[in-house]
Image (spheres, grey):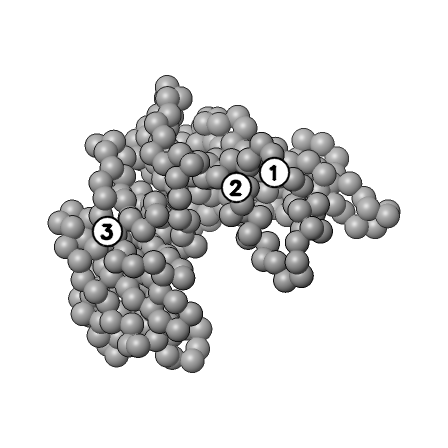
Amino acid sequence: YRENYYALVYTDDETASALVTRPLSGGPLQTLASWEPENENEACRCVLRCVSFGKAYVNVNRETYALTDGVQLTAVAQESSLVSVDLQTGEVSTILENDDGYDLYSVWEDIAAFRMLEMAEDAPEFEDWLAQQPEGTSWDEYDRQFLGIRFLVRNLKTGEETVLVDASENYVRTVDPHRSWGQYAVYQVDRSLYVYDLEKQAAKKLFTYEQNWDFYNYMILDGHVIVIGGTEDTCRAWAVDIAEGSVIELDTLGGNVMPFSAHYECNGYFVGLLHNSNNADQYYISKEDYYRSNYDAAFR
């Protein structure tokens, strides 16, 4: 970011964390900010969520441990907050004192997008619920029954929040980490995909699946939302241009997965996994070939 590397590292036997940086050209690591345990049997493990407008946004997680049977350490309490770190000065500012349930999507200037989890008031403890279920019940069935999701934007200066999707709606989560790109955040409700423009503070519907699938997934890269849907045996995928709304169907070669899974992007290229390569090495493919479904052009 701006000709520097930034990383979140664990220190002191993984009980403390630090945000470090160095120039792309090389040189020693510099510590911008650090977080250490404040009490005995405590660990401070942080997560770098995103970098935007000269600030890094970090989840600061403090876990307190207790000995179980005198041997095993078990987490008995956790506190979590969201902070920003000025990349020039290292100044740390608290954004959310208690961010329990808030999952940061992206930040653009002073506007942030969050997914927020809400447990139903009458939800039983998971262990009690599981004991009453038939053998083989999936753990995510508990979430489907009792966990609601709100998708919202928050002004980080004023604290004002605007709910885009409330807990009564069918918000569909993505398993992909690419949930935002620049000023845009992508989300799904029922079978429709939306993008929210954090700069203009406006949402628009981008794509609707033609039919119900067994699974949905989506991601955003290179100014496009990649939309995936299918069954256990089949998969279809589309690339939707955010600005124009134009749709390109990507060829899945009759399989049940994307032939090329884009993990990163750079100028003119995607970097990711080529599924028919029988190895886990990263491949490169030009964006032009990717949108043309010319996966044979991928190279290492």
Whole-percent x and y of residue 170? 40, 44
Q: Which mark is nearer the camera, 1 or 3?
A: 1
Q: Quadrant of residue 269?
A: bottom left
Q: Residue at x 27, y 44 (%)?
A: 194
198 or 34: nearer the viewer? 198
For badge 3, the amino acid type reads Phe
Q: Are marks 1 and 3 in contact (CB under 8 Å)?
A: no
Residue with the mark numbered 2: 147
Q: CA distance from mark 3 to mark 2?
A: 26 Å
Three-letter amino acid code of the residue under disc 2: Leu
| Residue 237 visible in image | yes
Mark 1 in CB contact with mark 2 (< 8 angstroms): yes
**Compared to 1, does 137 lie above or below?**
below
User: Is label 1 in a helix, a strand or a loop?
Assistant: loop
Mark 1 crowd level (few <14, some 14–19, many ≥20, 10 Å Cα)? few
**Closest to the observer: 82 or 27?**
82
| Quarter of the figure that contains the C terminus | bottom left
Q: Which mark is residue 207?
A: 3
Q: Position of residue 27 (x, y in %)?
A: 42, 50
Q: Residue at x 37, y 79 (%)?
A: 276
Residue at the spot of label 1: 123
